[in-house]
Amino acid sequence: KDLMAKITSFDTDILDWGDISQEALNTLGLIPGAHTPVDKLWYAVSFLEHVSNHFTFSKRKAVSADSLLKMVCLHLVVANVPYMNAEILFLEEFARDERLLRGKEGYALVTLQASLHFLNASDDFMKDIFLVND
């Protein structure tokens, strides 16, 4: 099953909507409209910052890397952005500035890659990703 089919068939009503940042969803939705790798990476960084800030504010604790991956997966499923795999492949191919990729932009790209990898590999989002304890 391809990722979009899995996302479309996933019942988002069972999720805790308090874990969702509307700002993060809005920013994630801007990635496909950006035309350059730099702009797409800027939105990716902004997306991660919104997710991290939302988690830190709502849970009153710093976000760990494992928790961040889970939250990014959650937002990717809820946002249902078409062709997200293609967006990340575009960045892998055309984002070549080493200085850029060593900073926040590189971290954002790797985090999105890992999250998409988990989602693509999963046959059951709830069991494989969302029920994992932090």
Image (tube, rainbow, N blue to C red):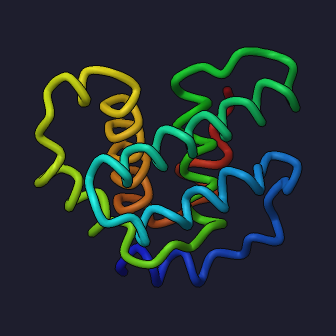
**Which image quadrant for residue 4?**
bottom left
- Quadrant location of residue 1? bottom left
In the rendered view, does 19 fall on the left or right side of 69? Answer: right
Q: Position of residue 131 (x, y in %)?
A: 68, 45
Residues 117 and 100: in front is 100
User: Where, by quadrant of the figure, is residue 79 drawn?
Assistant: bottom right
For the C terminus, the quadrant is: top right
Residue at 88% across, 32% down: 58
| Position of 103 relative to 13 (above/below) | above
Residue placed at 25% from the left, 29% from the top?
100
Q: Residue at x 37, y 54 (%)?
A: 40
Query: Number of labelled discs?
Result: 0
The residue lying at 57 percent from left, 83 percent from top is 8
Q: Where in the figure is residue 128, as x and y percent of width and height?
A: 53, 51
The outermost residue toward the top is: 62
- Tell me if residue 92 comes above or below residue 132 in the rendering: below
In the image, taking residue 26 as reference, residue 104 lies left or right, namely left
Q: Position of residue 54 (x, y in %)?
A: 77, 36
In the rendered view, tell whether residue 27 sits above or below residue 56: below
